[in-house]
């Protein structure tokens, strides 16, 4: 397994379709959380929403052959279940196919929601 120095290194090492989708996710995260701190968690890109944020205070993304994964938190997936009904989901994740546009506004809303939850806890 490759150890990447930066999130951009990780993204640039992906196949073209995956790379484009990951760049969109990164742009959405940084639009919603411009102060997010880039890091890695389980060797995948993560964006800490608070300084020294633990896993549950991070948004993670990962690239795969046919989809990209967004890992915002189980509470976010629950809150946006209706809007995510057309996508494969896990307890705290959603898969966006790389052959379809990333729903930018939805992703931004999800990140903003997660930030609000962290601010009040």
Image (cartoon, rainbow, N blue to C red):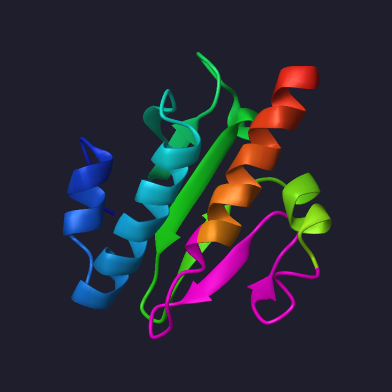
Task: Name the residue located 41 percent from the left edge and 55 percent from the top edge.
Answer: 25
Classify the position of the C terminus by image quarter: top right
Spot occupied by residue 94 in the image (x, y as percentages of width and height): 62, 65
Spot occupied by residue 58 in the image (x, y as percentages of width and height): 56, 34
Query: Viewed as shown, does residue 23 lie left or right of 34?
Result: left
Check the image and report above or below for 92 versus 120.
below
> In the image, which residues are magenta?
82-104
Q: Is residue 96 magenta?
A: yes
Q: Is residue 59 magenta?
A: no
Check the image and report above or below for 66 versus 70.
below
Query: Viewed as shown, does residue 61 lie left or right of 13?
Result: right
Per the picture, the main secondary structure of the magenta-coloured stretch is: loop
Task: Name the residue located 21 percent from the left edge and 45 percent from the top edge.
Answer: 8
Task: Name the residue located 50 percent from the left edge and 38 percent from the top edge.
Answer: 32
Residue 117 found in image quarter: top right
Classify the position of the N terminus by image quarter: bottom left
């Amino acid at each position: 397994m490759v150890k990447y120095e930066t999130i951009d290194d990780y993204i640039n090492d992906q196949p073209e379709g995956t790379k484009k989708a990951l760049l969109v996710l990164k742009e959405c995260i940084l639009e919603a959380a411009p102060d997010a701190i880039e890091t890695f968690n389980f060797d995948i890109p993560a964006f800490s929403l608070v300084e020294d944020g633990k896993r549950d205070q991070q948004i993670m993304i990962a690239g795969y052959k046919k989809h990209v994964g967004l890992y915002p938190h189980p509470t976010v997936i629950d809150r946006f279940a209706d809007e995510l009904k057309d996508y494969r989901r896990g307890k705290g994740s959603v898969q966006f196919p790389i052959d379809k546009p990333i729903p930018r506004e939805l992703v931004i809303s999800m990140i903003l929601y997660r930030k609000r939850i962290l601010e009040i806890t």
